[in-house]
Image (cartoon, rainbow, N blue to C red):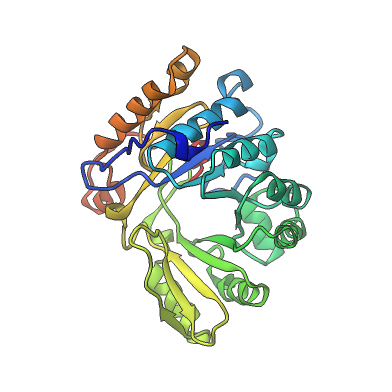
Amino acid sequence: MTAVSALPAVLAGPDRLDRSLRDVRISVTDRCNFRCPYCMPKARFGPGHRFLPRAEALDAREIIRLAGVFASLGATKIRLTGGEPLLRTDLVAIVEGIARLGVPDIALTTNGALLRRWAGRLRDAGLHRVTVSLDSLDPAVFSAMSDSRIGLSEVLDGIAAARDAGLEPIKLNCVVQRGVNEDGLLDLVGFARREGLRLRCIEYMDVGATNGWRLADVVSGEEILERVGRVYPLLEESSAPTAVARTYRFADGAGDLGVITSVSHPFCGDCTRARLSVDGKLYTCLFATSGIDLREPLRSGADDDTLRRIVADRWKRRDDRYSELRGLGIAQGDRIEMSYIGG
């Protein structure tokens, strides 16, 4: 496998808003063992839902090859997502292949239910970090938000296994919804502080077209900070210009808290992310309505230079800023579902 440093130094940017490509999220499956209402509501993704046929999904070699294309264009971070990526039986091989490319930062986002059995093997394969989605420590709320029979204890065991394997720092992602889980926020903060985990609170977003999103259900970042700060005083830290989370340090030194405010304080101007769907389409925004197909040229024999030109051309024409335009009422077609491109 060719190392990234040996590949042509062809950068994919900047785009029309002067943003460079630095982060790529690769969805390795559209399947999931949870049915979180804000992502894969059971009414839409129930027993009759037709998931992508295996032959239409990128295989491990194709994923690794496209990861190399992105890395050669300037991407320094690759995050594997889903659906639930731990449902993919060849995930270790995918991580190994990306690690051989020399990518500096390889991360994984998971619901954690299968992490106990995978954590050690993924660390040995070259995975650097893991983010676990955890919306509540209340078993009843957790069950409602995951809409599954999987117990909270399995996720907590997975987090412990990731820590034992050295997949640190471990981040927790919590989507905060009014009337659903905001009352348990302080319990989650206390847990993260005790366990040395980095909690990231995410405003409920209107991703896709099936989650029934309403602005009234959003708990703003400011409200989250006010709730937490009353009990655990916070000090704002300076964040990297391209960071999606505003980071606050606990005044007593027990870690930090991040708040992702795509609704109340959009950060489109600093977005350096591209997304690759499980069937090989490139999306340049989480709220995109369409992507460009990389699978067809890949399977038709295109060489890496051709694939680089396709990606670089699309990136340079990128002008996405949906979150900034949301409040202006600008019409847009059906957005791609979060489970398809990994959030």
Q: Is residue 321 left or right of residue 105?
A: left
Q: What is the x, y in percent for residue 317?
A: 24, 34
**Residue in the foreground of this view, choosing between 297 and 275:** 297
Residue at point 60%, 53% (across, down): 128
Q: Quadrant of residue 216?
A: bottom left
Measured along the vertical axis of the image, is residue 284 above or below residue 242?
Answer: above
Q: What is the x, y in percent for residue 140?
A: 69, 62
Residue at point 55%, 76% (across, down): 255
The number of discs equals 0
Q: What is the x, y in percent for residue 258?
A: 47, 68
Asked if residue 329 shows in the view, the reply is yes
Residue at point 66%, 59% (across, down): 142
Residue at point 49%, 64% (across, down): 201
State the quadrant of the N terminus. top right
Measured along the vertical axis of the image, is residue 291 above or below residue 192?
Answer: above
Q: Is residue 236 left or right of residue 116?
A: left
Asked if residue 337 shows in the view, the reply is no
Q: Is residue 113 left or right of residue 63?
A: right
Q: Quadrant of residue 160?
A: bottom right
Q: What is the x, y in percent for residue 37?
A: 55, 48
**Residue in the foreground of this view, choosing between 191 and 67:** 67
Which residue is at the far top?
A: 300
Which residue is at the far front?
A: 6
Measured along the vertical axis of the image, is residue 299 above or below residue 110?
Answer: above
